[in-house]
Protein backbone atom coordinates (compact mmCIF):
# COMPACT_ATOMS: atom_id res chain seq x y z
CA UNK A 1 0.00 0.00 0.00
CA UNK A 2 1.61 3.21 -1.18
CA UNK A 3 1.03 6.26 0.99
CA UNK A 4 -0.16 9.51 -0.47
CA UNK A 5 1.51 12.80 0.37
CA UNK A 6 -1.10 13.34 3.09
CA UNK A 7 -0.32 10.01 4.76
CA UNK A 8 3.42 10.43 4.99
CA UNK A 9 6.01 12.87 6.27
CA UNK A 10 9.25 13.33 4.34
CA UNK A 11 12.13 12.27 6.54
CA UNK A 12 15.43 12.79 4.77
CA UNK A 13 15.30 10.31 1.91
CA UNK A 14 12.54 8.21 3.53
CA UNK A 15 8.83 8.70 4.11
CA UNK A 16 7.26 8.13 7.50
CA UNK A 17 3.97 6.39 6.92
CA UNK A 18 1.40 5.17 9.44
CA UNK A 19 2.78 1.65 9.05
CA UNK A 20 6.33 2.55 10.07
CA UNK A 21 7.76 1.42 13.36
CA UNK A 22 9.57 4.14 15.25
CA UNK A 23 11.88 4.42 18.21
CA UNK A 24 11.03 7.12 20.72
CA UNK A 25 14.38 8.75 21.44
CA UNK A 26 13.45 10.25 24.80
CA UNK A 27 11.92 7.01 26.10
CA UNK A 28 14.12 4.54 24.14
CA UNK A 29 11.06 2.42 23.48
CA UNK A 30 9.53 1.01 20.32
CA UNK A 31 6.26 2.55 19.18
CA UNK A 32 4.09 2.56 16.09
CA UNK A 33 2.92 5.59 14.22
CA UNK A 34 -0.86 5.44 14.37
CA UNK A 35 -1.30 8.51 12.20
CA UNK A 36 0.77 11.14 10.46
CA UNK A 37 -1.21 14.39 10.37
CA UNK A 38 -1.75 16.18 7.09
CA UNK A 39 0.45 19.06 6.10
CA UNK A 40 -1.44 22.12 7.25
CA UNK A 41 -0.46 24.65 9.91
CA UNK A 42 -3.47 23.81 12.05
CA UNK A 43 -2.76 20.05 12.17
CA UNK A 44 0.79 20.27 13.55
CA UNK A 45 2.73 18.76 10.64
CA UNK A 46 5.80 18.35 12.81
CA UNK A 47 4.17 15.66 14.96
CA UNK A 48 2.94 12.11 14.59
CA UNK A 49 0.38 10.27 16.68
CA UNK A 50 2.29 7.34 18.20
CA UNK A 51 1.15 4.35 20.19
CA UNK A 52 3.12 1.52 21.79
CA UNK A 53 0.43 -0.88 23.00
CA UNK A 54 2.76 -3.57 24.31
CA UNK A 55 5.82 -1.45 25.11
CA UNK A 56 4.33 1.03 27.55
CA UNK A 57 4.31 4.05 25.24
CA UNK A 58 0.98 5.81 25.72
CA UNK A 59 -0.92 7.14 22.71
CA UNK A 60 0.06 10.76 22.18
CA UNK A 61 1.37 13.26 19.64
CA UNK A 62 5.16 13.19 19.47
CA UNK A 63 7.55 15.45 17.55
CA UNK A 64 9.30 13.93 14.53
CA UNK A 65 12.64 15.28 15.70
CA UNK A 66 12.39 13.04 18.77
CA UNK A 67 11.54 9.92 16.75
CA UNK A 68 13.78 7.64 14.76
CA UNK A 69 12.50 5.41 11.96
CA UNK A 70 13.29 1.71 12.09
CA UNK A 71 13.38 -0.64 9.09
CA UNK A 72 10.42 -2.64 10.50
CA UNK A 73 7.05 -2.01 8.86
CA UNK A 74 3.65 -3.21 10.06
CA UNK A 75 1.79 -4.32 6.95
CA UNK A 76 -1.76 -3.09 6.23
CA UNK A 77 -2.12 -1.02 9.41
CA UNK A 78 -5.05 1.32 8.72
CA UNK A 79 -4.59 5.06 8.96
CA UNK A 80 -5.68 6.59 12.30
CA UNK A 81 -6.24 3.13 13.78
CA UNK A 82 -7.51 2.85 17.34
CA UNK A 83 -5.51 1.40 20.22
CA UNK A 84 -7.02 -2.08 20.00
CA UNK A 85 -6.40 -2.26 16.25
CA UNK A 86 -2.81 -1.11 16.65
CA UNK A 87 -2.28 -3.68 19.41
CA UNK A 88 -3.72 -6.48 17.25
CA UNK A 89 -1.52 -5.60 14.26
CA UNK A 90 1.48 -5.07 16.57
CA UNK A 91 1.14 -8.57 18.03
CA UNK A 92 0.24 -10.32 14.75
CA UNK A 93 3.31 -8.87 13.04
CA UNK A 94 5.54 -10.05 15.93
CA UNK A 95 7.05 -6.59 16.10
CA UNK A 96 8.84 -7.08 19.42
CA UNK A 97 10.38 -10.34 18.17
CA UNK A 98 11.66 -8.65 15.02
CA UNK A 99 12.88 -5.66 17.03
CA UNK A 100 14.70 -7.88 19.54
CA UNK A 101 16.70 -9.53 16.75
CA UNK A 102 18.08 -6.26 15.38
CA UNK A 103 21.57 -5.12 16.30
CA UNK A 104 20.10 -1.76 17.25
CA UNK A 105 17.87 -3.32 19.95
CA UNK A 106 20.71 -5.48 21.23
CA UNK A 107 22.95 -2.43 21.50
CA UNK A 108 20.28 -0.57 23.49
CA UNK A 109 19.81 -3.60 25.76
CA UNK A 110 23.54 -3.81 26.39
CA UNK A 111 23.66 -0.10 27.12
CA UNK A 112 20.89 -0.35 29.72
CA UNK A 113 22.46 -3.46 31.22
CA UNK A 114 25.80 -1.68 31.61
CA UNK A 115 24.12 1.38 33.07
CA UNK A 116 22.54 -0.79 35.77
CA UNK A 117 25.90 -2.23 36.85
CA UNK A 118 27.00 -1.37 40.35
CA UNK A 119 30.47 -0.14 41.22
CA UNK A 120 31.45 -3.64 42.31
CA UNK A 121 30.20 -5.13 39.02
CA UNK A 122 32.36 -2.68 37.06
CA UNK A 123 35.33 -3.60 39.27
CA UNK A 124 34.81 -7.33 38.62
CA UNK A 125 34.53 -6.65 34.90
CA UNK A 126 37.78 -4.67 34.92
CA UNK A 127 39.53 -7.55 36.73
CA UNK A 128 38.26 -10.09 34.19
CA UNK A 129 39.39 -7.91 31.30
CA UNK A 130 42.79 -7.59 32.91
CA UNK A 131 43.05 -11.39 33.23
CA UNK A 132 42.02 -11.83 29.59
CA UNK A 133 44.64 -9.34 28.41
CA UNK A 134 47.31 -11.17 30.45
CA UNK A 135 46.40 -14.53 28.90
CA UNK A 136 46.36 -13.12 25.37
CA UNK A 137 49.69 -11.32 25.81
CA UNK A 138 51.39 -14.55 27.07
CA UNK A 139 50.50 -16.39 23.87
Image: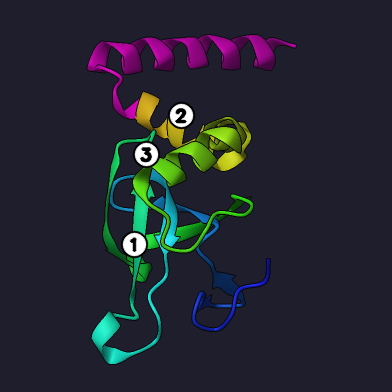
Q: Earlier in the sequence, mark 2 or mark 3?
A: 3
The location of residue 97, given as percent across then percent down, is: 58, 30
Vertical arrangement, residue 67 with respect to residue 124, above or below: below
Question: Cα distance, mark 2 to mark 1?
Answer: 29 Å
The location of residue 71, given as percent across then percent down, is: 62, 53
Question: Cα distance, mark 1 to mark 3?
Answer: 13 Å
Q: Is residue 40 magenta?
A: no
* Helix, strand or loop for disc 3: loop
Residue shown at 24% from the left, 87% from the top: 42
Instruction: Find disc 3 in the rendering and name its residue.
Output: 53
Vertical arrangement, residue 10 with respect to residue 105, above or below: below
Between residues 52 and 87, which one lies in front from this camera angle? 87
Which mark's residue is nearer the viewer, 2 or 1?
1
Q: The magenta stretch spans which residues? A: 114-139
Q: Is residue 69 left or right of residue 1?
A: left
Vertical arrangement, residue 108 with respect to residue 131, above or below: below
Type of secondary structure dominating the magenta stretch: helix
Instruction: Find disc 1 in the rendering and name its residue.
Output: 49
Which mark's residue is nearer the viewer, 2 or 3?
3
Residue shown at 48% from the left, 10% from the top: 128
Question: Cα distance, mark 2 to mark 3?
Answer: 24 Å
* Helix, strand or loop for disc 2: helix
Q: Is residue 132 magenta?
A: yes
Instruction: Find disc 2 in the rendering and name its residue.
Output: 110
Q: Earlier in the sequence, mark 2 or mark 1?
A: 1
Find the residue positioned furthest to the bottom.
41
User: Which quadrant: the N terminus?
Assistant: bottom right
Q: In this figure, what is the number of numbered marks? A: 3
- Badge 2, how many Cα within 10 Å: few under 14, some, many 20+? few
User: Which quadrant: the C terminus?
Assistant: top right
Amino acid sequence: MECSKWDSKQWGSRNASPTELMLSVCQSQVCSSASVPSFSPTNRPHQALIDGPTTGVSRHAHAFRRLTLTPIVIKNLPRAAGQTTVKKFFENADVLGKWGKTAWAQKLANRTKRAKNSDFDRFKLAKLKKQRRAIISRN
